[in-house]
Amino acid sequence: MKNLYLSQDEVKELFKKALGDSIDNYKMPQPIFAITESQIVAYDEINKTLVLKMPIKEQWLNVYDILQGGMIDVAVDNAIGSLSMLVAPISLTQIMQ
């Protein structure tokens, strides 16, 4: 796996390669990446692995001075969501009943 540290434009190109013209239907790079300062560090197309970097900010710490559980969820969602878009067909739940 090679380190990429992709720019936002390079991230968009990576997803465009995977999604084709349908990328125009999505906000790419994902807005949450800017908010959390998340960054794709490495992507291995052959082994279908993705490494993300997300800093831990002081305002995201709980009373025990560790990362708030919800922010851990954000990091996991960023990684799994991004990887799934790169390696699998898009699958969305649009209506909850």
Image (cartoon, grey):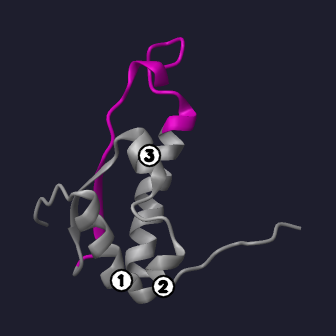
Q: How many residues crowd around disc 1 within 10 Å: few (fewer than 14), some, or many (20 or more)? A: some
Closer to the observer: label 1 or label 3? 1
Front residue of 57/25: it is: 25
- Mark 1, residue position: 18
User: How far is disc 2 from disc 1 in space, using C-alphas?
Assistant: 10 Å
User: How far is disc 1 from disc 3 in space, using C-alphas?
Assistant: 22 Å
Q: Looking at the picture, does residue 27 appear above or below residue 78?
A: below
Give x and y (percent) for residue 81. Answer: 48, 63
Give x and y (percent) for residue 36. Answer: 41, 40
For the point 26% across and 64% down, the residue is: 9
* Residue 75: mark: 3
User: How far is disc 3 from disc 2 in space, using C-alphas?
Assistant: 25 Å
For the point 39% across and 45% down, the residue is: 34
- Span highlighted in magenta in the image: 47-71
- Residue 88 counted in the magenta span: no
For the point 54% across and 80% down, the residue is: 90
Q: Name the residue type under label 2.
A: Ser
- Mark 2, residue position: 22
